[in-house]
Every structure is written in C-alpha cells, then in structure tokens.
Image (cartoon, rainbow, N blue to C red):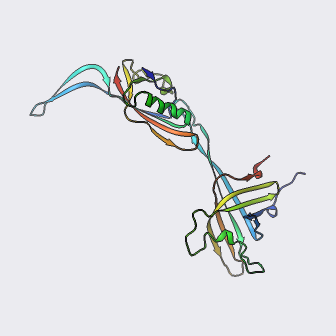
C-alpha cells in the first residue's frame, strides 16, 4: 500500500464516518437498526494544498494516477496532519484512504498551483 | 555627486517621442503575494507572485506649429469614433535621468479632458502596463 506524498496542507476538513448498519422500518414507523461491525468507515478528508510548486502539485496528481485513480488505497503520512499533536482518531490504524474524486488543480502564478483532494476512509 | 531629483528632472516619452507638455506623471508598482501558510504555521507566510504596474500623467493640450496634437498617440486609442484595436499598445518611457528610467509597453486606459475658464486645457491620462518592464533602472542601486 502506497503512501500519500509528504506535503503539509493549507487547510484540512474532516467528516467522521459511520459504522456499517442496517435499518428496518415497520409500517407504523418504528425503526430497528443492526450494527454489523465495529469499524468506522466512510470518513471524508478534504485537503487543500494552496500555492504549492508545480513539482509538489505533480507529486500529488502522480500519486492519484499511480493508485489507479479512485481504485487503490493508501496511507497518509504525518505531514498531512501538520499542526495536530494527536490525530489517531482521524487516521485509524485499521483504516486506509482512497480518492473519493479526482484532485482539482488550479494553475495560478507560473510555477505554482493549488491542489485540493477529497479522500474517503475505507476499512483496510 | 549626491543629488535629489525634482519634478523638473522628470520626462515622459511615448514611442520614443519626448512629450514636452507634461505637467506630472506617476507610476504605481505592486507585487501580489501568494499565501503559502500550512496547517502547522502560527503566522501566515507569503511569497511573491505577479507584478502589476499602472500610472497616470497630466498633459497639456498642445498643438505644435504644424497644428499637430503632440499627445495624439496617448489619446487616439481612447478618444475615437470606432472600437480600439485589441492589440494597440504604446511604448512609454519615464525618466529622471538617462540612467534612471522605466520603460514599458502600456495601454492608455483613461483620458479626462478638462477646460476651465482662465486655465490651460489639460488631459489626465491613465495607463496600464502590459507585461514586464523593459527598463527598470529607476529602481536599480
């Protein structure tokens, strides 16, 4: 399993995931839910790398391509969590990440670009 | 020899022609900044981005002996009966001394002509520099 490039983001947004569950609803509206596992999946992590050099930006889009775009799973290095002293609750050892959608790249001043990626937490 | 410069040192050339009837000129240069702050920084960090230059001048509305308008090249792309060519530019040289110059390709973007009783007719012109400066010895050591 590959590692995401060691680049510190400009901003980071995290949405916690959910535990796998089934829902049964009776005719009178009462819900019964069954939990199927202990893992939390489906986390979303949005990373924005603002005004990085073209070389750094390319390392991210190359990683996306080398991972089979949204197919492969990978780990995130500590740099992605720069500024956080504790991030185990986001980066669970039993989870990996997958690209939820293709990276978005904006080309700005020559030699620099802004890259944003949205990642999906999956069980690994 | 140490010296200050005064307004009388200032000169303005358009397309290599010295525009003699200039009352004043000014040039503003700025450089944008790119935010490169990362999530573990406690203060914002910036690097230089693109430069932008624009300026203005005031020229006296003056005809020479032959009846030609000296500032024709500065006005003709603004005061006209047809659309301005998208590629129309002029070469502007601002000078304090022969070794203190700024030269650039400019687009004259505004012309404010005013005629008042008891005063010489003058034109305030605004210009936008297109691209990098071709001479920038006014900022050199």
Q: Position of residue B118 (x, y in %)?
A: 72, 81
Q: Which residue lies furthest to the left in this view?
A: A27
Between A43 and B101, the residue placed more toward the observer is B101
Q: How many labels does the image show?
A: 0
Residue A43: image quadrant is: top left
Left or right: A21 as drawn, with respect to B139: left
The image shows residue A10 at horizontal and vertical percentages of 50, 35
Considering only vertical position in the picture, is B22 above or below A31?
Answer: below
Q: Is residue B117 above or below residue A109?
A: below
Residue B140, horizontal then vertical, whole percent:
77, 48
Report the front residue among A25 and A62.
A62
Which residue is more in the foreground, A121 or A63?
A63
Query: What is the quadrant of residue A75 in the picture?
Result: top left
In this rendering, would B26 be left or right of B49? right
Residue beneath the point at 47% across and 33% down: A61
Q: Which residue lies furthest to the right in this view?
A: B1
Q: Would you say B59 lies left or right of B112 here? A: right
Identify which residue is drawn at 38% across, 35% down. Answer: A101
Quadrant housing residue A124:
top left
Instruction: Please give the name of the residue rendered at 56% of the width and 32% of the height, measured from the top-left corner.
Output: B42
């Amino acid at each position: 399993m590959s590692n995401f490039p060691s680049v510190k983001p400009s901003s980071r947004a995290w949405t916690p995931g959910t535990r796998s569950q089934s829902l049964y609803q009776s005719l009178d509206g009462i819900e019964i839910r069954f939990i199927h596992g202990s893992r939390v999946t489906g986390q979303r992590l949005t990373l924005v790398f603002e005004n990085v050099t073209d070389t750094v930006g390319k390392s991210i889009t190359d990683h996306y391509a080398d991972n089979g775009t949204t197919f492969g799973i990978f780990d995130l290095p500590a740099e992605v969590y720069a500024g956080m002293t504790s991030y185990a609750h986001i980066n669970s050892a039993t989870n990996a990440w997958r690209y939820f959608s293709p990276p978005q790249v904006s080309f700005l001043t020559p030699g620099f670009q802004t890259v944003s990626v949205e990642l999906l937490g999956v069980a690994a | 020899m140490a010296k200050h410069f005064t307004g009388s040192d200032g000169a303005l050339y358009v397309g290599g022609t010295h525009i003699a009837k200039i009352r004043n000129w000014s040039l503003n240069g700025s450089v944008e900044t790119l935010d490169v702050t990362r999530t573990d920084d406690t203060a914002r960090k910036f690097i230089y981005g693109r430069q932008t230059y624009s300026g203005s001048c005031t020229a006296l509305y003056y005809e020479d002996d032959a009846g030609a308008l000296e500032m024709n090249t500065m006005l003709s792309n603004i005061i006209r009966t047809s659309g301005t060519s998208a590629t129309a530019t002029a070469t502007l040289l601002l000078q304090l001394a022969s070794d203190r110059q700024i030269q650039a390709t400019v687009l004259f973007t505004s012309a404010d002509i005013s005629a008042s009783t008891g005063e010489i007719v003058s034109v305030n012109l605004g210009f936008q520099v297109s691209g990098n400066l071709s001479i920038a010895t006014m900022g050199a050591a």
